[in-house]
Image: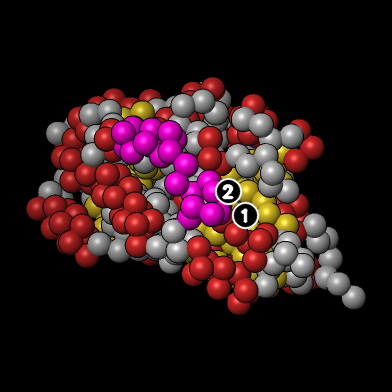
Amino acid sequence: MRVLVLTSSTGGGHNTRARAFAAWARRETELGLDVAVHQALEDTHGLYRFGVGLYNWIQRTAPRLHHIYFNFLELGGLLKSPTRMLGAAKFRAVVREHQPGAVLSVHGSLNHGFFGLARDTLRAAPPRCSTYCGELFGGYGFSRHWVNPRADLFVGAVEECTAEARRLGMSAERARIGGFLLDPAFYSARLDERERRAVLREKYELDPDLFTLLLTTGAVGANNHLALLEALKHSRLRPQVIAVCGRSTHVWQDVAAWGMAHPVVPVRAIEFTDKMAELLQCVSAVVARPGTGTTSEAMLSGCPIIFNGLGGVMPQEMITVKFAAAHGFARVLQRAHDLPALLEPLMATPEALTEVRATMSAARPPGMPRDILEMVTGVTHAAS
């Protein structure tokens, strides 16, 4: 079966899930799936591409302003009707080229008009249209556009997500829980203590006996690395730090220069890495924006997370914080200089870290990504 996965680069979580679906399809060869990933907004029309850029600019510069952007989209219906969509002919051409038997959306804006266009383009054999939603909670911040009651299936990461889909009109029999859709590396065997120590010592030249804090940069470059490092410099706490700087050379250069100038805080600045599954198992805690992607990865990896709320928390991030609060592991950083106070309980004793890891583990949903592949396609084995 051919599967067309619809995604967009607003943030990084949507693309992460799209790539994960394709990776699992390559791994589970007996399902016989041929997956194509399509950047639906960017490649359909310039106005949609502008909207993606605006979203990412807001996330980098002033996250609290995203409340205006989010509510504008919630009130509007720019992508709900196939007949009113811009660039419809371009998307129809993509559908005709791929001839998918299943269309999967992993983005909140792609579950209505794009489904309608796909079905209309392939009228003789309409594709099975499904949504996978990685959001973790309902209420304000959960876009109503995620839910299309006429879709064949809605798969939510957790029960709270699926319950919200039902509240918004998805029938109970078409709303299912699928668990996290993450890269296969996050489901591989966990590193043992010897391997963990070796990675920190040999790969990052750090002391495996010290508390190691990971600072992440979002896919669009959102970060507060220097402010957080300054907070640690003025603190009595002395964690060692790994700062992931994404694909931004200037961020990497700034952090590396800061580390050279302030050796009191051991810092390793690294650029983009595809080894997050390994890294999250090796560090003691991570500071990250409250996105569903890194939160899900941290939960699977057993890595305590501190949510970076500097500049405000976006609506979509608010529901991640709600989920963490409901399950007992929410720590939100609202001012850079508060970082030491949030770290102190985690650094107090090894038992404190163990307790937080157990709490996060208990909140993990059941299921494996292969289950999601089977739900979305209706295929449980390759055709004979």
Q: Position of residue 207 (x, y in %)?
A: 34, 52
In the visual, does 33 lie left or right of 319? right
Residue 185 in sight here: no
Picture layout, residue 218 above or below residue 230: below
Picture residue at 63% right of the left edge, 49% below the top? 131
Residue where numbered disc 1 is placed:
116
Residue nearest the observer in this picture, 27 or 282: 27
Q: Amino acid at mark 1?
A: Gly
In contact (CB < 8 Å): disc 1 and disc 2: yes
Quadrant of image for the N terminus:
bottom right
Which residue is rendered at x = 46% and y = 26% of the image?
Answer: 140
Helix, strand or loop at disc 1?
helix
What's under tag 2, amino acid-wise?
Answer: His
Q: Position of residue 211 (x, y in %)?
A: 36, 41
Query: Residue 9 falls in which quadrant of the image?
Result: bottom left
Q: Give above or below for 171 relative to 51.
A: above
Instruction: Count the labels in the image.
Output: 2
Residue found 65% across the figure and 66% down from its top: 121
Task: Point out the stretch of residues depicted in magenta.
Answer: 66-85
Query: Which quarter of the figure is the C terminus placed in?
Result: bottom right
Tag shown at residue 145: none
